[in-house]
Amino acid sequence: MLKIFKETKIFVYCPANHVTGGVELLHQLVDKLNNYSLDAYIVYSQKDSLVPTDYSDYNIKIANDVIDDEKNIIVIYEGIFNKAFITKKAQLLLWWLSVDNFYYCSTNFLSIYDYLKWKPFYGMKLLVRRIGALVIKQRNIFKVKSLNEIKNLDAINCYQSEYAQNFLINNGFNRLAALTDYINSDFNNFISDYKRENVVLYNPKKGYKFTKKIINATPEITWKPLIGMSRNELINTFQTSKLYIDFGYHPGKDRIPREAALNGCCVITGMQGSARFFEDVPIPNYFKIDERNTPISNIITKVNDILQNFDRYTIEFDFYRKKIKREEAEFDYQIRNIFNL
């Protein structure tokens, strides 16, 4: 799909000084490309940044700037697609790691019309902000790009999730290719005979407003937030707990549900974003709850049922776990397909 020459250099834009699922994925791509004997570089958002310690085992080279040459390739993640418009010669790969983060991170350049189509209330708030910027700071709010202009770029559009693929197809994008991700092998050392406690895990940075209602209604349950933990502490927490819940929006194929399941936990998700797609979260419907129209009492009943019958329910995640373990091989295949290896 992309043209590779002997002189080709591949530049992958990446936020600096962050340790998140999306950031790790950008490092994983550079690592894989370099291991295939290509010449790939991370380009951090801040010059002279260092590779985070968590990613020190990856085969990473750093460039402070991209070289816009027709033999080179520039990979741009969804939060900074505006950079694609300053690329004049290089081959472009636009990587849709998240649909929602595309909108949330594009407020400085994406048209109000596209926001009104996506979320009208959010679009109106953004319109007020832009008018304020025009009046107070004398910024030109009309120098914007539309989703249609992004669609018409000469670029390959890669999607991390079925959710993103669905979005791209519905908006008329072409030259599509899957470029998903995989879970770091550190999380793949599951020890089945760990003693598990009746502990329910949750991510306080996601869907917490709703999760808090369940927590407040169940003082008899031990709840543990996944925050401030090293990778080893996180793995140990997964392997000694029974259930992870993940309500709120799933902007892409999220990592924490997979990390939890891979380490033996049962998982409950909502049905927003990628969570509603079986291809992204392939778990039985019993474990997917639309929190927008399900009584709290019903959710509590299900949580207690899983805690009390953990041994029976955990085997229902075996298909999910097998799929997660195949992800790195699929990622390798996708890279070979896109980069003509």
Image (cartoon, grey):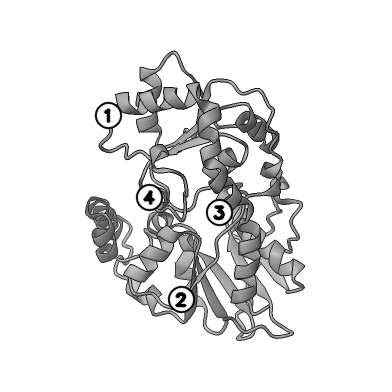
Question: Where is the N terminus found, in terms of image quarters?
Answer: bottom right
Residue appearing at x 47%, y 33% in the figure: 204
Between label 2 and label 1, give the one nearer the viewer. Answer: 1
Q: Position of residue 264 (x, y in %)?
A: 60, 35
Position of 268 relative to 303 (above/below): below
C-alpha distance separating marks 3 and 2: 22 Å
Residue position for label 1: 295
Q: Are marks 2 and 4 in contact (CB under 8 Å)?
A: no
Report the front residue among 34 and 293: 293
Between label 3 and label 2, give the one nearer the viewer. Answer: 3
Question: Where is the C terminus found, in terms of image quarters?
Answer: bottom right
Residue appearing at x 55%, y 47% in the figure: 319
The tag earlier along the polypeptide, 3 or 2, is 3
Q: Is residue 163 left or right of residue 296?
A: right
Q: Position of residue 58 (x, y in %)?
A: 74, 56
Q: Which mark is residue 22?
A: 3
Amino acid under disc 3: Gly
Q: Secondary structure at mark 2?
A: helix
Label total for image: 4
